[in-house]
């Protein structure tokens, strides 16, 4: 885990292994961003000129290392691009700061202590820089023995320009640390190989976190699920040697006036089941518990930040495997709600586990339910790899979540739930089928879930199948592998729920 400190030290006087400065484009010229004045001075005011000679433009994603001149207490200066400089005097965009800080932290492997001299005018800037740096400094090393030569990202991050004695700056730093530690914990869970992260292992992790942070955690094991009639979760888990779990993890605040329920899809491995996925590239299907990881992280982060709202997380955990005991296409499951579902395709399993969890969550009559799931390939086709889809039974709630996501730097897009797609899920045998028309498959899945939400409860569904797991080269603060998609949106949503704004 990376340590974070705010410092009022000057950029030229602080001792560190590397010093990060920002550069931006202003018209055709490159400009050094505020915060790095002392660094520029150490370069005799020629920092921009030197960087331009080296081909820098200030574009987002750019990272150029320079040997530090005499007069600085760090051996290396790293210039990261912030993109277009804002119109005179305006603050830099929070997401530009977050990404640049992330790029810096990722670039500085081998540097133990990194000081950031990026533009900070308000606590929000420090928060964004801290978030980007701490998310960028993530590395998943649990399964590698690289020995003592391992070049790890910085273990110590110092934000210059932050005021450590100012209440608002302190709160911003603490918030950023809690949030990013939980996002990185979600990433660890997503990246963990599925032979180790079974439903029981995930549930045990939730129980340990509950103890650590004073959260109430209840786990329904396969016996309790059978007794309770959770046909969806049991049906999906039936083929696996690793039995399913339903976890309830609850954070309550004494002054809370509202309760937000979060439901996460937690398929620890999705082979497709009897409707087996074709061979090739299926190792990424360990990411199919990203929704549950996001919900888990959001509940713990809300608790650590101390939001004045109750947040109840429901983790629907199962492994989708083919075997002699697996659910077959043609089987009918009696769901926890009492509804019967004909399984036409065992690879449409996420909606089955979520349905039971949605019904269960509805029993407590929360003010709203938000589910998060790597639910459909169709959503990836529609929105690409970096944007999650938002569906809801309330247009204003859907809009609010879309706007919140934008504020915290997560790409999302509102999607409809067209009623005409419902009839495709009619079944000749059961109350409904777990599949409908192929076209609009992401919306069909949303319509399926909608039927398991309690009467009159505001509900939204986030399909994070695209952004949950990043297969390309790392960029900004996004690493390869699990990303922690949706956590920032959920925590901000909980905050807005506490404030009574949504
Ligand atoms: N877990 C997958 C969806 C997915 C796809 C997640 C790509 C992450 C990346 C889900 O369980 C699934 O298999 N969905 C099917 C549904 C279909 C059978 C109706 C799909 O999208 O093909
Ligand atoms: Mn599937
Ligand atoms: Zn799945």
Image: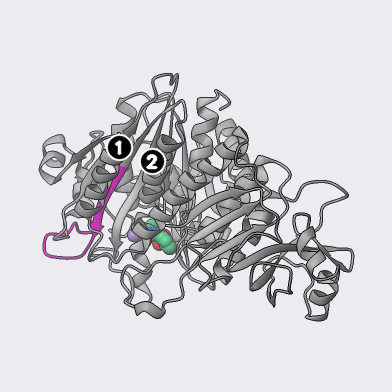
**Disc 1 crowd, CA 10 A, few/some/many (<14, 14-19, 20+):** many
What's the magenta region?
A: 315-331
The overriding secondary structure of the stretch rendered in magenta is loop
Marks 1 and 2: CB-CB under 8 Å? yes
Q: Is residue 34 left or right of residue 78?
A: right
Please indicate, yes or no, whether residue 205 appears anywhere in the rendered image: yes
Quarter of the picture holding the N terminus: bottom left
Tell me, yes or no, whether the highlighted magenta stretch contains residue 329: yes
In the image, which disc is placed on residue 249?
Answer: 1
The one nearer the camera, 158 or 480, is: 158
**Disc 2 crowd, CA 10 A, few/some/many (<14, 14-19, 20+):** many
What is the CA distance from the residue labelled 1 to the residue labelled 2?
Answer: 9 Å
Q: Identify which residue is drawn at 52% across, 32% down.
A: 495
Which residue matches tag 2? 300
Q: Identify which residue is drawn at 56% across, 59% down.
A: 386
Q: At numbered mark 2, what does the secondary structure look like: helix, strand or loop?
A: helix
Q: Identify which residue is drawn at 46% across, 25% down.
A: 308
The one nearer the camera, 110 or 498, is: 110
**Residue 196, quarter of the rendered image:** bottom left
Q: Is residue 459 left or right of residue 384?
A: left
Quarter of the picture holding the C terminus: top right
Please indicate, yes or no, whether residue 393 appears anywhere in the rendered image: no
Q: Position of residue 491 (x, y in %)?
A: 49, 39
In the image, which disc is placed on residue 374?
Answer: none
Tell me, yes or no, whether the highlighted magenta stretch contains residue 455: no
Q: Position of residue 263 (x, y in %)?
A: 37, 40
Query: Cβ of disc 2 within 8 Å of ligand 1?
Result: no
**Residue 167, quarter of the rendered image:** top right
> Is 24 placed above or below 416 here?
below
């Amino acid at each position: 885990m990376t340590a974070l400190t705010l410092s009022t030290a000057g950029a030229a006087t602080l001792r560190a292994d590397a010093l990060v400065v920002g550069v931006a484009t202003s018209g055709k010229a490159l400009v050094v961003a505020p915060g790095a004045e002392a660094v520029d001075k150490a370069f005799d005011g020629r920092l921009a000129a030197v960087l331009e000679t080296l081909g820098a433009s200030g574009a987002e994603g750019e990272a150029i290392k320079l040997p530090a001149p005499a007069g600085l207490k760090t051996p290396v200066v790293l210039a990261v691009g912030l993109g277009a400089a804002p119109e005179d005097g305006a603050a830099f965009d929070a997401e530009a700061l977050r990404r640049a800080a992330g790029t810096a932290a990722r670039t500085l492997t081998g540097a133990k202590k990194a000081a950031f001299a990026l533009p900070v005018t308000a606590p929000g800037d420090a928060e964004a820089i801290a978030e980007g740096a701490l998310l960028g400094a993530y590395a998943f090393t649990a399964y590698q023995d690289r020995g003592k030569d391992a070049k790890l990202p910085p273990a110590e991050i110092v934000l210059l320009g932050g005021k450590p004695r100012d209440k608002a700056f302190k709160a911003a730093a603490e918030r950023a640390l809690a949030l990013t530690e939980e996002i990185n914990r979600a990433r660890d869970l997503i990246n963990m190989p599925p032979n180790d992260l079974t439903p029981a292992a995930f549930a045990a992790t939730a129980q340990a976190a509950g103890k650590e942070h004073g959260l109430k955690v209840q786990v329904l094991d396969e016996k309790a699920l059978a007794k309770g009639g959770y046909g969806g979760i049991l049906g999906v888990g039936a083929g696996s040697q690793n039995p399913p779990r339903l976890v309830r993890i609850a954070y309550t605040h004494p002054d809370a006036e509202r309760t937000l329920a979060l439901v996460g899809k937690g398929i620890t491995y999705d082979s497709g089941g009897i409707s087996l996925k074709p061979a090739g590239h299926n190792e990424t299907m360990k990411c199919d518990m990203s929704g549950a990881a996001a919900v888990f992280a959001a509940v713990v982060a809300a608790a650590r930040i101390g939001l004045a709202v109750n947040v109840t997380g429901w983790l629907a955990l199962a492994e989708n495997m083919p075997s002699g005991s697996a659910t077959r296409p043609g089987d009918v499951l009696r769901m926890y709600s009492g509804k019967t579902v004909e399984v036409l395709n065992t690879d449409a399993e996420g909606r089955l586990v979520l349905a039971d969890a949605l019904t269960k969550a509805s029993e407590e009559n929360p003010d709203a339910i938000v589910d998060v799931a790597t639910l459909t390939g169709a959503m990836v086709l529609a929105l690409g790899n970096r944007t999650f889809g938002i569906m809801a039974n309330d247009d204003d709630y859907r809009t609010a979540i879309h706007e919140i996501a934008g504020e915290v730097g997560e790409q999302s897009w509102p999607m409809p739930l067209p009623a005409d797609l419902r009839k495709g899920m009619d079944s000749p045998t059961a109350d409904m089928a777990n599949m409908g028309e192929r076209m609009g498959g992401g919306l069909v899945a949303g319509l399926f879930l909608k039927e398991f939400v309690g009467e009159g409860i505001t509900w939204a569904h986030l399909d994070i199948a695209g952004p949950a797991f990043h297969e390309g080269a790392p960029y900004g603060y996004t690493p390869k592998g699990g990303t922690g998609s949706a956590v920032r949106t959920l925590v901000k949503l909980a905050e807005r729920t506490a404030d009574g704004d949504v």
